[in-house]
Image (cartoon, rainbow, N blue to C red):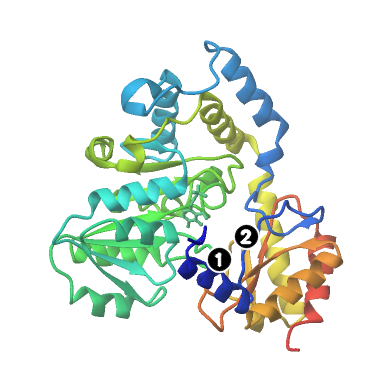
Amino acid sequence: MQLFPKELSDKLQARRENNAFRVLKPQAEAIDFVSNDYLGFATHKNIYTNASEKVKSFVFRNGSTGSRLISGTHVLHEQVESELAQIHNSPSALLFNSGYDANVGLFSAILQKGATVLYDELIHASIRDGIRLSNAKSFKFKHNDLSDLQKKFSKCTGTVYIAVEAVYSMDGDSAPLKELASFSAENHCYLIVDEAHSNGVFGVKGTGLVQALALEKHIFARVHTFGKALGCHGAVVLGSQELRDYLVNFSRSFIYTTAASLHSIAVIQAAYQELNNTNAIAKLKTNIDFFKETLCKQNLQASFIESNSPIQSCLFPGNSNVKEVAIQLLKKGFATKAILAPTVPQGQERLRICLHSYNTFEQIETLLMQLAIFVGK
Ligand SMILES: Cc1ncc(COP(=O)(O)O)c(C=O)c1O
């Protein structure tokens, strides 16, 4: 017997042949246009020190010792949940160990047999996986297309949920949240918004796009993750107290896993405290504006997907093509990310550039000058 089944080897081989084989490697030393650390919080000294001091003030503990429903709930978990509910203007908040866990646990738990979920075709894999774990019907609608949403809505039965992202992770554009909230209200749908890439970036003190648009009361559930602008790890589901109770009782990725350690929770708390004082959000916005102005000056905007967020994507169709651009830019000292098919549809492979508060104008100008060499080739 072979030690590895042939059908699995064949799949790996197909990945190699499509130039889409994934490998792990530590991030190269280069100017950061790749990480999700939009505000530089992952290496922020005050956050580090405040979190460490907080942990020291509790009984010495390395791990949480159990799942939240057994021995893993500490007063700090509950304290941070109530702070997050307040900050995000929500009746309740429930922490999950990651955004992936939050989406899988939320969607798989709420979607009952007979219900339907409508989701944007660019929705994140974690939401798709949550939907796949449920017995509900699901239809995708064209990206940000309300008339297609209306069309797909006519096929729905039972309770209808709509799933979108405040900022799409690969395109960087935003869902039309106001229109979606009106549509949901008119048609009695439950709207769910993933704020992974808008948390810490949009809204007063980075509270997200839903709050920037004052739509909190129109949203059934919001998912905010902490692995991007907050520079740490974990996620929170925001919604009614009944939703929180429901998830504590039925969400399997919440129930059947060890609770996050106190250190993780203390870092989340310290990162939110820093959001109150920081000028990094304003700096990030200045950099996004400067990047877009420079795109126009260099006549590059036609190759980019329109976006007002830190995620700026330049289309380079073909896996080998876009990989080569990323390699060449790295040789010049710029870390960017080639996004390949099947992560994005074939023909829409792109170079994903993430902007940060700590990038300088000079770095942005030089990156775009280097990129211009490849655009249109
Ligand atoms: C839109 C979106 N939702 C959820 C997640 C998952 O979050 P986490 O990295 O915390 O698991 C990501 C991360 O890639 C994301 O981009």
Residue pointed to by mark 2: 310
Q: Earlier in the sequence, mark 1 or mark 2?
A: 1
User: For this view, does 32 lie left or right of residue 138?
Assistant: right
Q: Do the residues bearing badges 1 and 2 touch, measured as CB atoms within 8 Å? A: yes
Q: Is residue 184 above or below residue 258?
A: below
Residue at 58% x, 48% y is: 228
Image quadrant for the C terminus? bottom right
- State the residue in front, 5 or 345: 5
Q: Which image quadrant is residue 14 in?
A: bottom right
User: For this view, does 184 lie left or right of residue 7?
Assistant: left
Residue at 72% x, 64% y is: 336
Residue at 64% x, 76% y is: 19
Which disc is residue 172 wearing? 1
Q: Is residue 343 visible?
A: no
Residue 290 horizontal/vertical position (percent): 73, 65
Residue at 54% x, 46% y is: 206
Circle 2 SS class: loop
Residue 241 horizontal/vertical position (percent): 25, 36
Q: Which residue, as the protein is rendered here, is positioned at the far front?
A: 1
